[in-house]
Amino acid sequence: MAFSCLSSTPMQLAGRAHRPTIPRTALVAPHPLPSSRTTACIMRRASTAVQFYQNRQLEAFASKPATRLTLRQLVFFGRSMNEERLIKSANYVRSELPIRISHRLRDMQALPYVVVTQEGVAKVYELYLEAFDKFRRFPQITTLAENDAFCDFLRSILNEHKWIIPNLSLGLSLSSPYLLSDRLDSFMRRMLVSRISRRVLAEHHIALTDFVNGRQDSTLEKESVGIICTRLKVKDCIDRCTQYLRARPDNVDEDILSGPLNKANWSEVVVDGHVDTRFAYIRDHLEYIVFELLKNSFRATRLKHPTARTLPPIRATVVASENNVCIRISDQGGGLLSSEIKSPSDLFSFSHVRNAGRLADARLGALRTVSSSTRGMTATVSEQVDQWSQPSAVAVDRLNPHPRIGMGLPMSNIYATYFGGSLDMVSLDGYGTDVFVQLPKLGTNLEGIEV
């Protein structure tokens, strides 16, 4: 019977919902009888599950397709913003987000029971269900005052969902033994891409509202439409990320495995190629990609050259063609492949089969700390820099200001491919790594949401 439960999906178990929800650990080891308070909690969850699976509203929303947009559509619609267009934007976001959330809820229901009950997954499940219910009940927006209230609502949802990434990563890493690697990675990709899409719509609408209300920085008005920078200079992004990373202590990458590291100054970053390249893109997305790739190159270079007085430089080359912008980041950090990693793309995987580090105690511990902290995780550069500059706030959560939770490369890959770009890594084993980021220049690709 236990094995039947493990292989069943929550949908299949809905008919047995009168049975209390049993933690995975209870299937492998006996526990003392639960207290009355614990029993009440279990039965309350079971009741919630029954209500959820019989939710006709969810069925109605999940049957609708997502209305995907392009970067160019977001720019063109937001460029001539007025009260009428702002209210139209608000109602699009109000009606679109519950559809996208409902698709992911159905995705989670299709997972095996043992995965849904994993640590972290249930938390995400509950947050999504609660957000879905709040969105579908939010009334139609007809005035600017109602739109302001809607923006406050969006901000509260964005804040509540700061714990989605670490909880999801923790739960799916622990679920790796129960899912084929392709299925696990496909599920995680859909979840994370959908999360990015919802944040883009919400944050873009909030930024448009700030512009209409005169709250946007006047220096940004000419080069920004909502959260999209229409003349984003690639070299400036690289220089800014370099400045942030080189300001860190030189021992920031020391851990139990590495031991004491080289005390030399951080590598210089040489930017060449088409250094004046500008294009329309979301600044936070591009900077996160560059920041994470440079951070990995800085670390690898220091580890590879433990006795060098001057560390080898890192080279960032920018090339703009008619349709694309390409960034190549080259380092001399020794390459990527090891006994645990057979292909560079395995570093994007959440499966322990392709990336054994997913089940490493240190990584799981870091994920647990982040997922239970008061700060959560939004996957932005500003979030990380703020943690470094506010050590007292980090100390409250006993959080390492430089946690290694294994999300940098997977999130960078998803950001790069969200509007039709790509991220590819070439390992020159024993010498270094070349990473190629290609982003569409015209903004005509639809969001990469999978239904």
Image: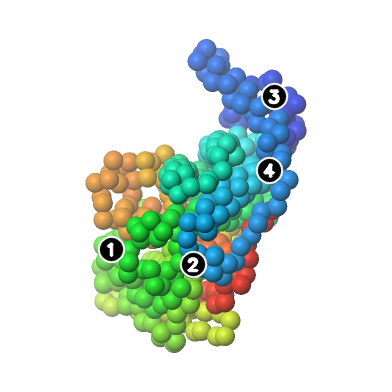
For marks 3 and 1, give the CA distance: 52 Å
Amino acid of disc 1: Arg
- Most foreground residue, 96 or 168: 96
- Most foreground residue, 75 or 189: 75
Amino acid of disc 2: Ser
- Most foreground residue, 251 or 138: 138
Q: Secondary structure at mark 4?
A: helix
Residue beneath label 1, please?
Answer: 248
Q: Residues within 10 Å of mark 3 (few under 14, many from 20)?
A: many
Is residue 303 toward the left or the right of residue 425 in the image? left
Asked where in the image residue 42 lies, by quadrant, the reply is top right
Looking at the image, tell me whether mark 4 or mark 3 is earlier in sequence order: 3
Residue under the image location 54 percent in, 69 percent down: 76
Q: Secondary structure at mark 3?
A: loop
Q: Which mark is residue 80?
A: 2
Looking at the image, tell me whether mark 4 or mark 1 is earlier in sequence order: 4
Residue under the image location 62 percent in, 37 percent down: 116
Q: Label 3 near label 4: C-beta < 8 Å?
A: no
Is residue 396 toward the left or the right of residue 257 in the image? left
For marks 2 and 4, give the CA distance: 31 Å
Q: Residues within 10 Å of mark 2 (few under 14, many from 20)?
A: few
Residue beneath label 3, please?
Answer: 17
Looking at the image, tell me whether mark 3 or mark 2 is earlier in sequence order: 3
Which residue is situated farthest in the bottom direction here?
Answer: 273
Q: Secondary structure at mark 1?
A: loop
Residue beneath label 4, please?
Answer: 61
